[in-house]
Image (cartoon, helix red, strand yellow):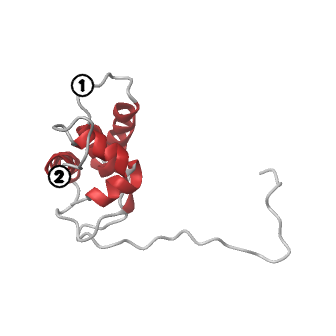
Amino acid sequence: MYCTLNDLITTYTEKNILLLSDRVNKPAVIIDEAVVQRAIDDAAGEINMYLQTRYTLPLPSVPLVLKRIACVLAYLALHTNIQDDHPARIAAKDQRKLLSGLANGELSLGLDSANAATPTNDAAMISPGRNDWGQRW
């Protein structure tokens, strides 16, 4: 599972999740956890569809970027009958671009073929007495 009900509440507020999930009571009175879980499952299924070509699923841990993507996709799934220019649909479109980049290898989760974190070589090098910031090459 890439995100939880609590993740959605943290990201979008309890009131928003309540209003989108309670499809019985008007006004909404309780978060319908079954509706929310279906949205979360739909998001996970879509994410898996992209990732299964490059990663062994399930992942041993969920990278933060996937949690964010899952929240956006689940939030969209909670909506019904929205226009193409709705902010939830636009946000989901952007997250799908990230997923596409992960699927085709343009982006990486930083995991090797065994789903272990790969070491990075992103250390800064400092040399005393040298200032290259304004230098023209």
Residue furthest toward the bottom?
128
Residue 93 percent location from the top left of the image: 35, 34
Q: Pick the residue in front: 49 or 35.
A: 35
Q: Confirm or deny contact between disc 1 and disc 2 (CB under 8 A).
A: no
Q: Amino acid at mark 2?
A: Gln
Please state if 84 lies on the left or on the right of 129 as rendered. left
Q: Which residue is mark 2?
A: 37
Marks 1 and 2, how far apart in space?
19 Å
Q: Position of residue 4 (x, y in %)?
A: 26, 59
Residue that label 1 marks: 81
- Position of residue 88 relative to residue 137, above or below, is above
Q: Quadrant where the N terminus lies?
A: bottom left
Q: Amino acid at mark 1?
A: Asn
The residue drawn where x is 59% and y is 72% is 123
**What is the residue that sits farthest to the right in this orientation?**
129
Residue 3 at what x, y percent from top left? 28, 58
- Foreground residue among 46 and 42: 42
